[in-house]
Image (cartoon, coloured by chain):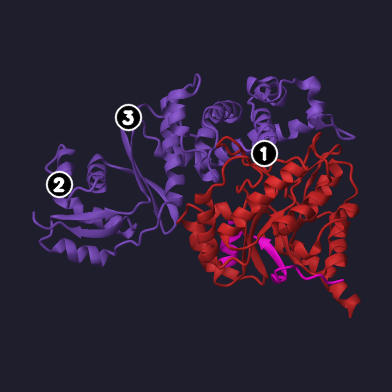
Chain colours: A red, B purple
């Protein structure tokens, strides 16, 4: 099955998160990576080396911006100064799209620099949809929001996460970044079936996929981005392709980061699933 | 607060109070801030957060609470490696927790997390051996972070500078790049920082005035010790004084006849390091 996303945003192929450790390798080798995703905040408020490097990389590769501090689910006021900086950076690097997470990161002016969960109920949904629409109007482009890894369940949640995301994406007319590792982690932590989760998503809203490693603590999983993608997550990745067709796919590896070739080799494993599907379709 | 988010707001404030308590989730649940949101304690937690098959509600809340401090401690340990070395991991953790409790992040970027850390060590932190030395080290390490991200200004080349200086233009202002911090310190910390970063042992030096320039050259943060005369000249220029005025400050910082013989070398070095970004001729003087 091939379901195009509602905005016809392109399948960029297989990308990597741009990390400082790999700057020199990229500038020396200009490796055959399809695209890079940047953590937006790392390039705001700097005119130093990160931006100098990014300018060169953006001349040669498509760039997607992925943030961690929009705090779209916070009850604090929307920070338009921050959004203006995001918008300016998006113009500078010609970002193909930009997004963040379905979460909040702080309240009362504070930032915990973590992706905190929100209760999934009608009131939160209404509140979030309104905020997303305001942000999208300001940014003049759809927001591509990622399903977070979560570790707790609120007593006042009244709908499953996948239903909440579905309603949010349709009502706010925003995109989804489907992190299949987060689906795995969240379902493990909440005793849910990840295939039922995937079955409930609106794939015409899914613009991008994340894959990553995590830490399995036995009693629960933590989204640590510190290793290879496990087989169960690859199986979920294959399921997403079965349902939606190819999507721009990005590997996140943020701790204990190995040399560039090793990270690149990990994301290239995704090509097998994509090619397999293409071959079966042919 | 609109009605549709008042409950969410209460929940978020409660979570923030619990997740960020320096003594962990258990203490956070009992804190006044958390109870101001929900007058409940750990026993009634299940009314807000459900258990999973493997974890109690309290254990699930603790996952977020544990991650908060460890993540931010890591960030500050990266930014202040010499302070971390001096305090050791245990005391560094204590000091950072105190710091974050008094100065939690209020920015979208982690780059600003440590901006008050040197002053905190100097004035607010609990009992610390070698407090003033550690605070001086922290100032230099924070300055390195500042110049790393500071605004870019294209440097003036040595030729451009040379031709101007050869003319009768002493009433000029030399503009220094924004990515330059000039620090006057009560300890000679620069060599110690180098030793720690190179894994060499060095005793903590005795108190003595020192001056350090921290700047970005070719996108790399660098730090060098400055003799008092060089410091006086550069800081005068940074304050916007004319070259004449800056040279007078420089002379007064010296016991000798002055730095004339060294001046050419100094300006050549500074220009080679890209410290100058503009020259302004002062008219009407």
Q: Which residue is mark 1?
A: B5
* Marking on residue B208: 3
Residue B252 falls inside the magenta stretch: no
| Corner quadrant of residue A203 | bottom right
Q: Which corner quadrant holds the C terminus of chain B?
A: bottom left
The residue lying at 53 percent from left, 59 percent from top is A87
Query: What percent of the width, then of the height, locates residue B72?
Result: 60, 37
The residue range painted magenta reads A1-27
- How crowded pointer 2 is (Cα within 10 Å; few <14, some 14-19, many 20+) is rated as some
Query: What percent of the width, then of the height, locates residue B235?
Result: 26, 44
Q: Secondary structure at mark 2?
A: helix
Query: What percent of the width, then of the height, locates residue B247?
Result: 16, 47
Instruction: Indicate which label's residue lies in the foreground, 3 or 2.
Output: 2
Q: Nearer the viewer, residue B193 or A234?
A: A234
Q: Earlier in the sequence, mark 3 or mark 1?
A: 1
Q: Nearer the viewer, residue B154 or B166?
A: B154
Q: Nearer the viewer, residue B117 or A3?
A: A3
Instruction: Indicate which label's residue lies in the foreground, 3 or 1.
Output: 1
Query: What percent of the width, then of the height, locates residue A272?
Result: 83, 69
Residue B130 visible? The answer is no
Q: Secondary structure at mark 1?
A: helix
Q: Which residue is mark 2?
A: B245
Instruction: Indicate which label's residue lies in the foreground, 1 or 2.
Output: 1
Chain letter for the residue marked with disc 2 in the picture: B
Distance from Cα at disc 3 to Cα at disc 2:
27 Å
Residue A223 visible? The answer is yes
């Amino acid at each position: 099955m091939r379901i195009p996303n509602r905005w016809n945003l392109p399948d960029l192929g297989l990308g990597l998160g741009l990390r400082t450790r790999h700057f020199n390798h990229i500038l020396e080798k200009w490796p055959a990576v399809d695209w890079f995703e940047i953590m937006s905040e790392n390039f705001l408020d700097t005119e130093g080396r990160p931006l100098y490097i990014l300018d060169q990389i953006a001349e040669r590769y498509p760039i997607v911006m992925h943030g961690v501090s929009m705090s779209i689910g916070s009850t604090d006021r929307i920070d338009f100064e921050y959004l203006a900086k995001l918008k300016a950076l998006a113009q500078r690097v010609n970002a193909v799209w930009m997004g963040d997470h379905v979460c909040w990161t702080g309240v009362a002016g504070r930032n915990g620099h973590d992706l905190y969960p929100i209760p999934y109920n009608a009131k939160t949904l209404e509140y979030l949809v309104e905020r997303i629409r305001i942000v999208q109007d300001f940014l003049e482009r759809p927001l591509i929001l990622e399903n977070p890894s979560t570790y707790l369940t609120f007593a006042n949640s009244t709908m499953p996460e996948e239903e909440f995301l579905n309603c949010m994406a349709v009502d706010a007319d925003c995109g989804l970044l489907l992190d299949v590792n987060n689906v795995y982690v969240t379902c493990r932590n909440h005793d849910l079936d990840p295939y039922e989760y995937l079955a409930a998503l609106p794939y015409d809203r899914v613009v991008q996929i994340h894959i990553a490693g995590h830490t399995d603590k036995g009693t629960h999983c933590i989204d640590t981005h510190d290793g290879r993608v496990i087989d169960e997550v690859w199986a979920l990745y294959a399921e997403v392709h079965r349902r939606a067709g190819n999507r721009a796919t990005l590997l996140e590896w943020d701790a204990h980061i190995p040399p560039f070739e090793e990270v690149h080799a990990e994301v290239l494993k995704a090509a097998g699933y994509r090619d397999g599907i293409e071959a079966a379709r042919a | 607060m609109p009605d549709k988010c008042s409950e969410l707001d209460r929940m978020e404030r409660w979570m923030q109070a619990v997740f960020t308590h320096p003594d962990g989730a258990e203490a956070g649940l009992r804190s006044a801030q958390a109870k101001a949101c929900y007058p409940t304690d750990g026993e009634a937690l299940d009314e807000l957060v459900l258990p999973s098959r493997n974890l109690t509600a309290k254990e699930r809340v603790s996952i977020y609470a544990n991650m908060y401090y460890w993540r931010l401690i890591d960030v500050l340990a990266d930014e202040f490696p010499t302070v971390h070395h001096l305090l050791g991991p245990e005391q560094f953790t204590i000091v950072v927790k105190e710091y974050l409790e008094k100065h939690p992040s209020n920015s979208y970027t982690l780059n600003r997390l440590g901006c008050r850390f040197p002053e905190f060590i100097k004035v607010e932190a609990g009992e610390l051996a070698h407090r003033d030395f550690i605070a001086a080290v922290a100032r230099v390490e924070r300055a390195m972070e500042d110049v790393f991200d500071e605004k870019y200004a294209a440097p003036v080349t040595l030729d451009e500078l040379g031709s101007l200086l050869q003319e009768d233009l002493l009433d000029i202002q030399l503009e220094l790049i924004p990515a330059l911090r000039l620090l006057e310190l009560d300890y000679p910390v620069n060599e110690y920082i180098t030793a720690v970063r190179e894994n060499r042992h060095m005793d903590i030096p005795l108190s003595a005035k020192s001056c350090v320039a921290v700047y970005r050259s070719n996108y790399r943060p660098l730090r060098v010790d400055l003799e008092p005369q060089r410091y006086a000249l550069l800081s005068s220029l940074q304050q916007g004084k004319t070259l004449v005025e800056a040279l007078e400050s420089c002379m007064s910082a010296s016991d000798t006849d002055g730095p004339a013989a060294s001046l050419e070398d100094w300006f050549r070095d500074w220009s080679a390091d890209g410290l100058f970004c503009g020259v302004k001729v002062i008219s009407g003087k």
